[in-house]
Image: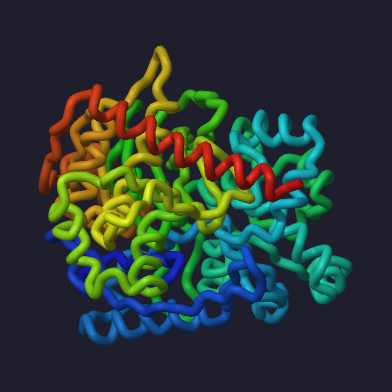
Amino acid sequence: MEKRYIIALDEGTTSLRSILYDTKTNEIVHTEQMPFKQFYPKTGWVEQDATEIWNSQKKTLDDLLQNAKISQNEILGIGITNQRETVVAWDKTTGNPIYRAIVWQCRRTAKYIESLPKNIVRKIKNKTGLIADAYFSASKMKWIIDNVPKAKELLDKKQLCIGTIDSYLAFKLTGKFVTDTTNASRTMLFNIDNLDWDSDLLNYFNIPRHALADVVSCNDVIGKCLDYNFELCGIIGDQQASLFGQACLRKGMTKATYGTGCFILMNTGEERVKSKTTLCTIGYTINGRTIYALEGSVFSACNAINWLKYNLNLYDDVRETSDICNSIPDNDGVYFVPAFTGLGAPYWDSFAKGSITGMTLATNKAHIIRACIESIAYNTYSIIRTMADRTISVKELHVDGGGSKNEFLLQFQSNMIQRNVIKSYQVESTALGAIYMVALAKKIMTMQDITKLYKVKNIYKPAITRYNRDNLFTKWEDAVATTLYHAKRSKK
């Protein structure tokens, strides 16, 4: 029986999927999806049940095999792409989690990060390319080790595994404790120059190396799955997977994924480009060759739009929001700063809270919805303009994710960046990134093949002047400044 299919496990922040790709037609032919629960035990805390994630992921995989009516002997391999920074701790002997997964959005360690000595903050930036923030995994790992008694017990026996979601899924699939360079680079513990866990940072956070996963390339063959007749052949964090799936394989190519948050990555080639307010991270490692990226993260994007529905009942169907925005000529001075879990790049304030400014008695729900969607484009532009330097700049922006279905958002984004916004024909860019890693591992595709497979669905061109853009953006920055002022006061 011919092996022609690749499966991607796409484990996101609020739902997960198993996706089947046909290498003969180069198309996604079947998808199974399930949501899973979020827990908010305290203000600013966000958790998930890792066992539920694994059981749900396995069910979608089993359902896919059954409902797509294919044999396991037809599967070339399976790849993982996942929400990054979220931390799981489990018992190596049983595979059972010892605490709920601490999600990337969780701010429980914000005060601890705020207390870090300046020399440690500098080391984190120099060695990992990251800005010290509760967003990343290190302080979450430390919190579990310091606060969960079972973690200390397992550490003493050298039976604790603590890692990102990909390493947990890989362990459950194959019994091997591994992660890839892209996920490792999001922990605040991984030296992105020598591609190894950094001893200084491990010592500072008191995280033993033996509790961390072995680090592999994104297209490494990990091994045969325990319950299936195919191999795990690729791991890549979701935002890097999107960069790869969008075929942003040349230096300067940039993408934005509008999902729960919005994540902007620029391919910087084999050179590590330093930036004060955006992150330098690993874009991907293939056959031991590493490509770097600059990244900026908007913590609240589509989840802010969902908040308008579920918390304020401002609309019934998200598909309405683009027409609602276009039903009014402008935002009438209303600005929305969706800092529900703090502000990410380029502001980096864990204590910021969401705000809506500029409302009058004439303000209606259309103004608030429009201000919310505009905020995604404003924040994306604020990140993109910090990425440009003398040697590299954004020529165009490739977009994907659920938010890319919103026509108003994409046109407004083009207006803000004053560049073309390119919408991919294939919206499943994140899954494609994992699929392509398997294809490279199995040597049935080349990098050139991946570039040729990319198709453009639509191009959005700037429709306002730079002067008008600057006027709108200045008012957004005023709203952000007000938010940051109140965040600063709340710390006192």
Looking at the image, which is closer to me, 103 or 416? 416
Looking at the image, which is closer to me, 246 or 336? 336
Which residue reaches farthest top? Answer: 390
* Residue under the image location 37 percent in, 79 percent down: 34
* Residue under the image location 34 percent in, 50 percent down: 257
* Residue under the image location 57 percent in, 76 percent down: 39
- Horizontal side of 247 relative to 211 (left or right) equals left
**61 to 167, vertically: above or below:** below
Quadrant in which the N terminus appears: bottom left
- Horizontal side of 218 relative to 103 (left or right) equals left
Q: Is residue 435 visible?
A: no
Give the image's coloring scheme: rainbow
State the image coordinates of residue 210 (x, y, percent, origin top left). Answer: 77, 57
- Horizontal side of 480 relative to 204 (left or right) equals left
Which image quarter: residue 30? bottom left
* Residue under the image location 31 percent in, 34 percent down: 472
**76 to 228, vertically: above or below:** above
Looking at the image, which is closer to me, 421 or 302? 302
**201 to 210, vertically: above or below:** above
State the image coordinates of residue 489 (x, y, percent, origin top left). Answer: 68, 45
